[in-house]
Image: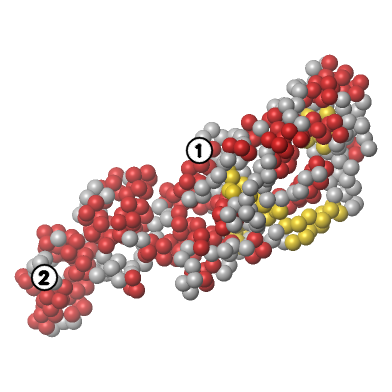
Amino acid sequence: MRNGLKPDLIERVLGAKPKYTIAELEEKFPARNLPEGAYVTRFAPSPTGFMHLGNLYSALIDFKLASQSGGVFMLRIEDTDTKREVEGAVDIVKNNMRRFGFKYNNDEKYGPYFQSQRKDIYRSVAADLLAKGLAYPCFLTATEMEEIRAKQNAAGFATGIYGEFARDRDISEEEIIKHLDNGEVPSIRLYSTCNPEQRIFCKDAVRGSISFPENNEDLVLIKSNDGLPTYHFAHLCDDHFMHTTHVVRGEEWLPSLPLHYQLFRMMGWNPPLYIHTATLDKIDEETGKQRKMSKRKDPELNVEFFFAAGWPTVALIEYIGNILASGYEEAKLKGQVKSFWEYEMKPKKIPMSGGLFDMKKLEWWAKEHIATLPVSELVQKIVDWVNEYGDSVHKEQIRDIDYLTGALSIERDNPKRIRKDFITWKQTLSEIAYFWDDLFVPNKEFEFNKDALNEFLATFDIADDKDTWWNKIVAVATKLGIKNGDVAMNLRVAVTGRTNTPDLYSVMQVMGEQRVKERVKNAI
């Protein structure tokens, strides 16, 4: 057993006396009082910019598993990488949690929930490791570490601080004191005793038991430049004292799994169960092949893309939920569940290969969702979107709410045959744009039968019921010796500029007598 440092030297190495013992931390953060089988999960983004679909993918799993099991879902901000932090990024994360309906429970008892505010906890655990000889102060400079990496690359060795390259691994107390007296500030490194020629078995909830080479690198636990922990060390401390039961993260973190198991076992703590998710992919338009979505190539990777375009957040959740739980769509179509929140998601069934994100498939989910909305809710969703993202044209479309409501109400009274041509709030306004004179585009290619239009105008009365209205169209067709549909098509194009619209009688009723007559006369 390697000897650790004495308390007074630990205090000098850390720059302050540790605030807690491990026993005091265990008492400060007691076990949660939750029902058996409850999941405790956390969404833990770094405040480095926008929220992307991969974040949403993970956060949805976190929230769903916690909520369906009667557990706890937390929002933890991993802000220890101060160089990459972007101003306002935390507000973006919180706003997006609200938009998607992910209610987090940040119980003050287990906080704070910003890692930058948990420095006393990390230093106290680091002090325990230093006292036990499981960590050591390292005084290597950035220049010296770069020289080591260059030698390793030249020799074909793995890069990192380990074995013979870990200069300060067995540094004496006298040498430590000498460095400290010179004003040098050390980083705190793990004293790894593992052998990469041996394997460690780790459990993943999706992949099952996986073996990896043991980690022999003396990784940094506490950084020298700001005294904050690295991701690996903060992850260890926070997930233990917050009593996280399941950690959801991307498969790119799989290589870190043996290190994290090593750290938990070193402390004598039980590791959480890890769920490593596959990438979100798309079909490349140029190659036709499936590839991982890219920040550089794919604007839709940023969830703000969907907000700005007016995609229903519910549809996005429903679609991603279906990617995560392959049986969900079938259960919904059979009427077994009404939404993803009613469907039980099982970690073992989360896909191991890249989930294919298809915008056309998202359109289907959006149409299905919008078709279920009461007209009043549809109107409100559109108004809310316009107020946040709309331009002057959109704002004009919501100025008269009654008129907008009338346009959106057409063919929504029969649940069995409800229209499904609305996809996004923005596209919906475009779809009904012909109701507004400033947005109406006359069809200049259509060859109008002016006699049919004139005959229609001669008897048109906005007060007619639908049967009377149609009988008048039939009368016009009979008089001119043409088909009923030809008369109706002439009217449809004259009034809307389009050859395909919802029920024409309803369209005219919403537009009103003056607007209908004016457009028909203009067509003539």
Most extreme residue toward the right is 1
Q: How many marks?
A: 2
Which residue has dot 2 on it? 464
Question: Looking at the picture, how far across and down is residue 405, in whole percent?
Answer: 25, 57
- Give the class, few, some or many, for how many residues have Cα within 10 Å of label 1's Cα (few <14, many ≥20): few
Looking at marks 1 and 2 on the same chain, the residue that comes earlier in the sequence is marked by 1
Colour mode of the rendering: secondary structure
Residue 20: name its quadrant: top right
Most extreme residue toward the left is 458
Foreground of the two, 135 or 51: 135
Q: Residue at x 68, y 38 (%)?
A: 29
Question: Looking at the picture, how far across and down is residue 366, in whole percent?
Answer: 43, 61
Which residue has dot 1 on it? 91
Q: Which mark is residue 495?
A: none
Question: Looking at the picture, how far across and down is residue 230, in whole percent?
Answer: 72, 36
Question: Looking at the picture, how far across and down is residue 15, in whole percent?
Answer: 76, 22
Amino acid found under the numbered disc labelled 2: Asp
The answer to whether residue 332 is visible is: yes
Horizontal relation, residue 42 to residue 201: left or right: left
Q: Residue at x 60, y 41 (%)?
A: 76
Q: Residue at x 88, y 31 (%)?
A: 4
Amino acid found under the numbered disc labelled 1: Asp
